[in-house]
Structures are given as C-alpha cells and as structure tokens.
Amino acid sequence: MSTGTERRPERVTRSVARRFAPIGGERGGALDDHHGPGGPVDRRAALRTMGAVLAGAFGGRHLGGSLLAADPAPDDAPANGARAAGDPFAPPGRCSWPSFRNGNELRGVAGCPLPERLELLWKAPAQDGMVSAAAIVAGHVYAPVLGGRLYCLDRRTGKPVWEYQSLENPKPNAFLPGFQSAPTVTADSVFLGDEDGVFHAVDRRTGKRKWTFQTQAEIIASAAVVGERVIFGSYDSHLYCLEAKTGALVWKLQTGDRINGSPAVSQGVCFVTGCDEHLHVVDVATGAERYKMPIETYLIASPAVYGDVLYFGTYTGEVLAVNWKEKKVVWRYRDPEKEFPIHSSAAVTGAFVVVGSRDKRIHCIDRRTGKRVWIVPTRGRVDSSPVVVGDRVYVGSSDGNLYGLELATGKVVWKFAAGRAISASPAVGEGCLVIGTESADGQIFCFGSSDAAGT
C-alpha cells in the first residue's frame, strides 16, 4: 500500500473527525466525513491523529542518583514474587510492561533498568502503522496495529508467535477495524478495544478470542484491570466495567462526551477524562460518580496519579496538577508563547513531570512547584508519551526520531532515526524498549543488549 495522500476507509476518516470536534446537542453536531478541525484529513494525517492517546515508558541501567528508587510504588505494582523459570507466558512481574503506562496509576515509569548502551535487536512490520504502546511480559511483545491485528512476537527475535484479528473469519482483503488502544496483559488474557467499538479479550497463550463486548463507538483508550474486573472508556461517552473472565457488564457510567483518555485507578477510585471538559472521579466497586470537576477544556491525554494529585496536559496547552481529594488545582504550567494542544500523557516521578507537546518540544516540570526545569526541541509534534527509566527519559517524535534524554538536564544522550513519524509511545520491560512507527509501511522496533537477548 502506498503512502502520501491515500485515504483510509471512510469510517476511519469519520472516526478521526468525530474525535476532535466538540459534541453539540444530545449526540452532537455532525462533521463533514473528511474534515477535522484543521481541514481535510488524508491517510497520513489520520494515522498521525490517531496516535493521540498513547503513551509509553522506559529507561536504562542508569540508576546512579536515580529518582526511581525513591518513588513510592503504585497501588498496583506487580509483586516481586517468583516467576516460572524460562516460562515465556509467566505472569507480569516487576520488570514487565503489561499496560499502556505500566500500571493503573499511569505514571509511565519502568520497573527495571535498560542496558547502558541500546542496540537495535530486531524490527518487524506493523501493517498500516502503530500509534499506541506495546506490552512486554515475560518472553513476548504484544503489539497492536492500525491494520486490525494484534501481534504476539518473541521478545528475543521478533518472530511471530500468534496473530489476532479484530474480525473473526474476515473475507479476503476485508477492512479490519484497527487497534488504537494499547493492550493490557494479565496472567492469562490480553484486553484491548478497536475502532468499531468492540472490546476484545484474547487468550494470551493461543491468541484465540475469549469474548467480545460491543459498545456504540470506537475505543481508543486502554483498559485498567482491577482484580477480576476490567475498566475502559468508549467514544459513546460511557465508562464500562466488565467481568474480566466473562465480559459480563458490571456497571457503566455515562459522561457528557467522548472518552479519550485511559482510566487511571488509585485508592479504589477511577479517574477519567475526555471531551466533556470534566474530570470524573468514580468509585471502582459501584460505578457511582463521587463528583466531577470542571477542567474548562477537553482532554486527549490520560491522567497520571502520584499520591493525591493527578497530572495531565490539556488541549489548550496547559499541564495541570489537581489534588483530587481537595478538588482543587495545585498548579498550572503553560508556555504563553506557544499554546499548542497536548496529546502526550505525562510521565511522573517524585521530582519531575515530563510531557510532550504539539509545539514540537518535550517539557520537564518540577512536580512540586509547576515550574519549568528544561525544554528540548524536536522537529515534529510530540504526541508520544515519555517513559522514565532511572535517570533517563525516552520519547518519540513525528520527526521520525526516538530520543533518549538525561532526566535531570534534558541533554540528548541517545537518538535513533526510525525513518517514519513516531506518535506511539515506548514500552519498556524485560530489559528491552519497544516502539512502533506510523504510515502504511510502519515498523516495530526492539532495542536492548544483544548480550542479554537470549535471556
């Protein structure tokens, strides 16, 4: 398939248009099928736009003076318990990257280091491109692509283990609804949603469909697994909670508009944002909304939780710190000279908040004060969500580069030219970093150490 101005099928173009126009009335005013807020949406623009909500996290074996060790563990941090030796399907552990931002608090911080020097271990095709984050657990990488496929790849070699398609038994050359959401991996299942609003539960060992659940609009947000339940949002404006084993509906909550961000979960509470310009605080057990707080702009990015404070970027170019217990904004960060939307989800440590922006820059903010620490320019939009690994941070840019920066200073210490725009977010787990590129001929790249690749 060619690149350039070729369009994706009409329903995907329409999906993108719906995503970025505020809804008016009960279900909202219609947009022209081939137009978003900035004008015509061609295939490449559609692919870039669909990378809005994804994020990743990663770092390296750079633990001297690391902030990682001092940070409190998230509520859902995997235990350090024993894993089956050599079992490629072992449950997620401390060094895994099982979900969008490596845990339900969505901090974007890796649990274990990367090698001091990253090498390209392998690359694999990503049909129609990849705009979300992969998952890395035990011996496998789970990579969703816009071509409607979820790949399970051998972590050491990149060779396919199984392939799951969004449609069961499709006709030859049929269009498959793409996967924009990142997968969430448990001991036995992989969960993710597709562009046609279907939420999928896939057997982790076999790649076979376990069950599906139909919503009324596309799903771009990733899921949070809480005990025996799985929680996710849809463009039909609902937040859903299902039984993880069966897909049975436990509860659902209607918000005022489409849900873009992945739900963050902490202290028995779920936090969700989207196009209705509110932060929703929801009881995980019952689905009851405790309250909603006006944000006064719609959000593409997902909130990260650190203690009692949420951190997220907005469509108007601000980064907010919100104390959800006190229901107040702690600080606001903005650059008055460059007010561009923020699609990137923040990585949060004890000292810093790091986020990308459509102003083509990566911003590091003091977590306590909201003051700027450093800014690093790139040559393209930064929709990719940064990942912190020890004393480094990794993030992609639509300029086609994957950047490795010193967390404290922003100094560029490593860079890889991928050859295509990167709106996907890094995933860092089991000693490697995985990220994908956009475009019809997109690719998945895995970095690590060749000395450790066989482990």
Image (cartoon, helix red, strand yellow):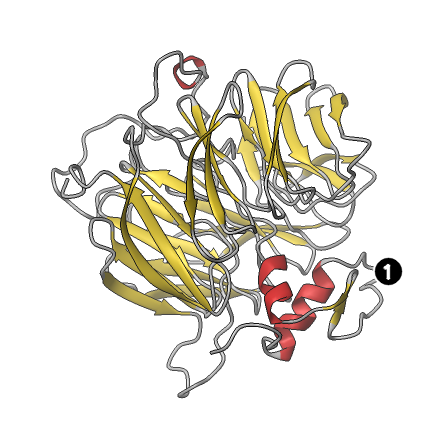
Going by the numbered disc 1, the residue's amino acid type is Gly
Q: Position of residue 300 (x, y in %)?
A: 67, 47
SS at mark 1 in the image = loop
Image quarter where the C terminus lies is top left
Between 162 and 411, the one lying in front of the other is 411
- Regarding residue 337, the answer to whether it shows in the image is yes
- Regarding residue 270, the answer to whether it shows in the image is no
Q: Which residue in the rendered view is the most extreme toward the bottom? A: 172
The number of callouts visible is 1
Q: Position of residue 377 (x, y in %)?
A: 61, 36
Q: Which residue is mark 1?
A: 24
Figure check: 386 above or below 71 = below
Figure check: 28 above or below 432 = below
Between 208 and 334, the one lying in front of the other is 334
Q: Position of residue 108 (x, y in %)?
A: 48, 33
Residue 89 located left or right of residue 123: left
Q: Position of residue 117 (x, y in %)?
A: 29, 32
Residue 80 located left or right of residue 275: left
Between 273 and 427, the one lying in front of the other is 427
Q: Quadrant of residue 92?
A: top left
